[in-house]
Image: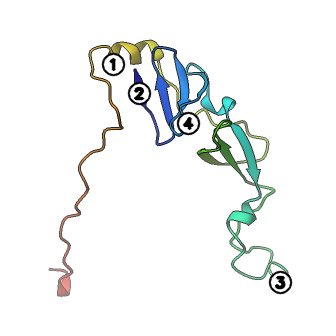
C-alpha cells in the first residue's frame, strides 16, 4: 500500500521504501532520512533573492548573505523532480524533517482502503469581511 506523504513523496508500506511520486522509483528505506537518497543542488541565495539595492554602494542589500545562509535543493535522482528546498546555515546537515514510526504506520493503514490519489480537503472559503467606518 502506498501512503502519500508530500506532493512529491510516497511511502510504500510493503517494501518500507520512499518513492518518487513523479516516476514511482524506489529511493531508499523509509526508516531513514529521504534526503540522503536524493540529488543535491546547493544554490547561491543571491541567485534566488537578487539584491534590491545597489550592492556596490550598500553593505546590506536585502538579499541573503551567502556567508550566513545557503539554499539547498533536493531532486529525484531518476526523474529530476524537485522534492524539497531548504534554507540552512553553511555546514549544517540536511534537516531530518519527516520521520515516521513505520510499524505504527503499517498498523494504522492495515484496515484502510488504499488511495489512488491524495485525499484533499474541501476548498477553503474565507468568511466575508467588512470594514465599517469607526470600527463598529
Q: CA distance from mark 3 to mark 1?
A: 59 Å
Q: Position of residue 95 (x, y in %)?
A: 63, 37
Q: Quadrant of the N terminus?
A: top left
Residues under numbered marks 4 and 3 in contact, where contact means CB atoms less than 8 Å apart = no
Foreground: disc 3 or disc 1: 1
- First of labels 3, 1 by sequence position: 3
Q: Position of residue 58 (x, y in %)?
A: 80, 80
Q: CA distance from mark 1 to mark 4?
A: 23 Å
- On the image, numbered disc 2 is attached to which residue? 3
Q: CA distance from mark 4 to mark 3?
A: 48 Å
- On the image, numbered disc 3 is attached to which residue? 57
- On the image, numbered disc 4 is attached to which residue? 23
- First of labels 2, 1 by sequence position: 2
Foreground: disc 4 or disc 3: 4
- Crowding around mark 4 (Cα neighbors within 10 Å: few <14, some 14 to 19, many 20+) is few
Question: Exactly how many numbered labels are in the figure?
Answer: 4
Residues under numbered marks 2 and 1 in contact, where contact means CB atoms less than 8 Å apart = yes
Mark 3 lies on a secondary structure that is loop
Amino acid at each position: 500500500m502506498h501512503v502519500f506523504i508530500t506532493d512529491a513523496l510516497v511511502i510504500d508500506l510493503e517494501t518500507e521504501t520512499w518513492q518518487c511520486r513523479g516516476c514511482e522509483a524506489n529511493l531508499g528505506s523509509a526508516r531513514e532520512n529521504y534526503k540522503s537518497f536524493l540529488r543535491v543542488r546547493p544554490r547561491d541565495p543571491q541567485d534566488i533573492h537578487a539584491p534590491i539595492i545597489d550592492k556596490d554602494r550598500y553593505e546590506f542589500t536585502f538579499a541573503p548573505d551567502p556567508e550566513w545562509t545557503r539554499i539547498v535543493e533536493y531532486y529525484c535522482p531518476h526523474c529530476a523532480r524537485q522534492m524539497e528546498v531548504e534554507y540552512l546555515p553553511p555546514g549544517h546537515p540536511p534537516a531530518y524533517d519527516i520521520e515516521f514510526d513505520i510499524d505504527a504506520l503499517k498498523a494504522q493503514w492495515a484496515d484502510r482502503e488504499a488511495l489512488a490519489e491524495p485525499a484533499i480537503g474541501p476548498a477553503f472559503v474565507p468568511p466575508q469581511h467588512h470594514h465599517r467606518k469607526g470600527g463598529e
